[in-house]
Image (cartoon, grey):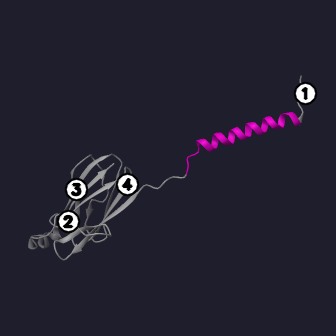
Amino acid sequence: MASHSFATTLPVVKKIALAAVAVVALAAPGPASAAPKLTVTITHVMRGCHAWDLGHGPMRAKMSLTVKRGTLVKLVNNDVMPHRLVPTGGPTLAVKGANMNKMAASASATFRRPGVYRFKTVYGPFFPWARSMAAEIKWMNVLHLTIRVK
């Protein structure tokens, strides 16, 4: 039986420990990068009743955006009327909270697949208390939103 001294086995143990640390470090995920987020607001305006608002630039009834895959888009209803977000084209997408039936209500979706997604909002008539308001005011904007995902 061969005799090993402490001095000869110590470098081997250090090499094994160093290799184990390296394997764990390479296998462990790095810091998670936060998914991009974007908030679009439905805002009450004097002409047209409501419009899309990004917080900068002009408010518009028709808006087009380009986002990266994985972007979370949050739509906030800051209008006095209820709105429902309705998909009108593009890949299938799960939208959480599409019935924005009061101020500060929000809808959100994460755009994981590339493509062109189209939406519009339907206001008022699907909420019984808002039917009369929508019937009386004929000049309200129908909001259209196009989101291109790269």
Q: CA distance from mark 3 to mark 4?
A: 16 Å
Give the residue type at disc 2.
Ala
Rate crowding at label 4 as few (under 14), some (14 to 19) or many (20 or more) other CA atoms within 10 Å: some
User: Which residue does the numbered mark 1 point to in the structure image?
Assistant: 3
User: Which residue does the numbered mark 3 point to in the structure image?
Assistant: 119
Give the residue type at disc 3.
Phe
Give the quadrant of residue 26.
Answer: top right
Question: Which sits earlier in the primary sequence, circle 3 or circle 4?
Answer: 4
Give the residue type at disc 1.
Ser
Q: Is residue 65 left or right of residue 32?
A: left
Name which residue lies at 37% across and 52% down. 68
Question: Which sits earlier in the primary sequence, circle 4 or circle 2?
Answer: 2
Name which residue lies at 9% across and 73% down. 136
| Residues at discs 3 and 2 in contact (Cβ within 8 Å) | no
Rate crowding at label 1 as few (under 14), some (14 to 19) or many (20 or more) other CA atoms within 10 Å: few
Q: Is residue 12 left or right of residue 44?
A: right
Q: Residue 93: percent from the left, percent from the top?
A: 29, 49
Q: Residue furthest front?
A: 57
Q: Main secondary structure of the magenta part?
A: helix
Mark 3 or 2: in front is 2
Give the quadrant of residue 84.
Answer: bottom left
Q: Which stretch appears magenta?
A: 7-30
Q: Is the N terminus in the top left, top right, bottom left or bottom right quadrant?
A: top right
**129 or 113, which is in the foreground?**
113
Q: CA distance from mark 4 to mark 2?
A: 22 Å
User: Which residue does the numbered mark 2 point to in the structure image?
Assistant: 61
Give the quadrant of residue 75.
Answer: bottom left
